[in-house]
Amino acid sequence: MSLRTRFALAFAVVGAVVAVLVGLLSYGAASDRVMAEIDRTLRSATVAVAQNPDQALSLSEAVERAPDLYPGPDLPGPGDEGARIVIARAVAKDGSVTQLGGPAVRLPVSGIARTLAASGTAGQADTTEVVADSHAFRLLTTALGGDRGALQVAVPVDQTHYVLGGMAREIAAASLTVMLAAACAGWLLARRITRRLERLAGVAEEVSVGDRFDGSGLVDGRDEVGRLSASLSRMLGRLAAAREAQERLVQDAAHELRTPLTSLRTNATVLRRVNELSPYARDRLLDDVEGETEELGQLVDELVELAMARDRKEAEEPVELAALARCVAQRVHRRTGRFVLLDVDDSVIRGRRQGLERAVGNLLENAAKFDADSDSPVEVRIRQGEITVADHGPGIAAADTVRVFDRFYRAGTARALPGSGLGLAIVRDVAEAHGGTVFARTRAGGGAEVGFTVEKSRLLGPEVPGEKAAGTDKRTQGARGNGAGP
């Protein structure tokens, strides 16, 4: 069943329920009022007859003595006179009936009427509806008390039932009309809503079977459908960006892999003539193959790390940046032999520990690589979630500061150094995953400062500046913070 049909049925059901409830309440109120008026007529006629118990009342006399009689346009009979028919009769204690006024109709004498007639208490009454001579009558029996029996007054209610029946039919017709109108309104409303949903479904189907990632064909609006369309548009934008990044990564990877693969292919060709090579040439060739293989493995590892950086399902947790920097600094010292000077505060952020460790590690290794000939320690500074790594190397040219975080980009001064050009690209991805940015600038006094920030909302608790020990470095001892060493 389509959504449009469900809307129409829902509206029809609601309309029908409301119409039926309103109709029943209206019919019940009208019926009760009409019957109340008839009962008032019977009580007024009873009073009028009771005031003249010894005189047989004619129709006109009963009307005159009971001027507030129900005018009876609903009562059957020819003309106005027939509309005012009132039947009055007396019921003796033995159950015999004496006609007092109105047409002689064989109204039944029930057991309750006989009981009231035999009752010695005046004023007790019973109202009921009886059928006599194929007509319905509303009958009021009132005890007169003593030995006087009871007095019965009746009026025909055929016309009343006819009017109430017509009213019921009109209410049923109105309910049916309301139900159909509600169904039509539901259909039209559902058509308006589902038309926009169908457009969104069409765009989603085109995306699922093709390469389309643009947001054309989506709908506008501030309602739920409009918000759904906006969310779909943002999703398509992210898909398009991911697709573009994927294609660029593949192209860049193919370009970067081509160089070591070409070198390996060349060396493999030379190895076919290994017996013709001198021991020195053979050793250089094997060293070259080993270096190219290591570089190729490192490049593949960094490509995998870069591709998985955004998709890694790593849970976020509170991370103390000082402890993280100390751990990474010790690892870099063991690997490169360089000392690291820490100047950190007590920043604690909500983030992904492994990604942050990789980013800080890449910054430290990058600084150690470009400042390999210096005896000065690499410096790490942390302030309120901002991590800065400084070295004393040649620095970064102004033209390169905006590109050093691009994938596979290598400045002119770095082309002779080992590396793939992916380390800082990974730093940028980690920073963006934490809502932050990256920066690179020339350090005052020489060298470079490279680092990243995290989103301020990720900071947990107060950021109190302080000092964190990260090993022992006697050459830097006494400076601000402690060096990271063995």
Image: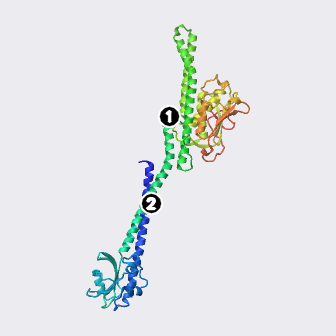
Disc 1/disc 2 C-alpha distance (Å): 47 Å
Is 232 on the left-hand or right-hand side of 115? right
Report the residue that reaches farthest toward the top: 276
- Towards the viewer: 352 or 34: 34
Relative height, residue 131 to residue 10 (above, below): below
Residue, disc 1: 210
Q: Position of residue 198 (x, y in %)?
A: 49, 44
The spot of residue 23 in percent (x, y) is: 42, 66
Q: Is residue 439 visible?
A: yes
Amino acid type, callout 1 = Gly
Look at the image and tell me whether residue 389 can be seen: no
Tag 2, which secondary structure? helix
Front tag of 1 and 2? 2
Residue on which disc 2 sits? 178
User: Could you say where residue 425 lies in the image, as x and y percent from the top left?
Assistant: 60, 32
- Extreme front residue here? 79
Say which element carries label 1.
loop
Residue 201 picture location, percent across and down: 49, 42
| Among the 4 quarters of the image, the one containing residue 383 | top right
Query: Quarter of the image containing the C terminus?
Result: top right
Give the class, few, some or many, for how many residues have Cα within 10 Å of label 1's Cα (few <14, many ≥20): few
